[in-house]
Amino acid sequence: MREIIKLNRDKTYKDYKLEFPELDVPGVYAWRGTSGKIKLGSAKKSILQRLLSARTDLEHGEVKVIGIIPTSNTNATREEQIAHNHFLDFATDGEWYHTIPTKIIHDYIHYRQGQIYENELILQRRCKTEVPTLWGNEKVVKFRPKCYFYPELPAQNTVEAGTDEKWRSYCARHLLDEPGIRTNPSFFMRRGRPRVYVSQKYHNEQLRKNKEIKEVKGILEGYFD
């Protein structure tokens, strides 16, 4: 990835999107300010848009991007907090940190990407079911679509593991305004309705939330009866 991005007010977001498509994703970013300090932040929609919004605060309109960790829009804040905790000893004010050697930041980014990869390997080891392919038998979990909200996890299978799996999905109508959702591999249409694949982790979180809502609703109904 290119490290120095020169910004000016004569170009629009669409212009930069064509020039830096790799930055038009949600995720965590690290850039070096004019003082030499490092800013660690996140963008739920587009890192590129976040950089453009900061150009008025930067000398000469230059943003020195050290690296990014692409995530889903729902995981950006969580991944940012992980980064903040990791570099806590360098923290100065808010999202700003003392000068951190570029190599250390690059090593951290590679580590986080490696963690995601390791999680995938763990899931493959847990799944014993294999399916035949042209290259021999493969773990079936390898071929499952990814969860939209936790892209490091596969979609939850709701039937017996094998070649006729059915993967859990949720309605995605409320997500249609999110950038790039229609090209996300976890997005699909069913009977003309938008849906996204979800993991068991996300599904369990929704079950807990629904249970809490019902409990609160029951308390309120009892209070007003």
Image: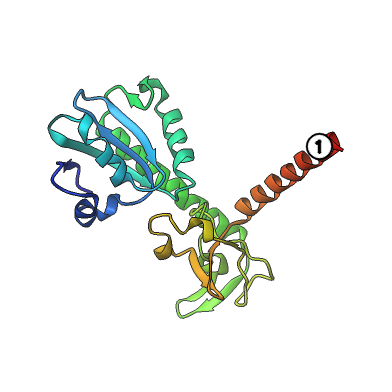
Q: Is residue 179 visible?
A: yes
Residue farthest toward the bottom in the current orientation of the protein: 134
Q: Is residue 147 visible?
A: no
Q: Which quadrant of the figure contains the C terminus? A: top right
> In the shown orientation, is residue 16 left or right of residue 151?
left
Q: Quadrant of residue 91?
A: top left
Residue farthest toward the top in the current orientation of the protein: 92
Q: Is residue 194 above or below residue 117?
A: below
> In the shown orientation, is residue 126 left or right of residue 150?
right
Give the residue at x 57% y 58%: 198
Q: How many marks?
A: 1
- Give SS at disc 1: helix
208 vs 65, nearest the viewer: 208
**Residue assigned mark 1:** 219
Classify mark 1: residues with Cα within 10 Å, few (<14), some (14-19) or many (20+). few
Q: Is residue 12 above or below residue 59?
A: below
Measured from the top left, where is residue 64 in percent x and y? 20, 37
Give the residue at x 42% y 47%: 114
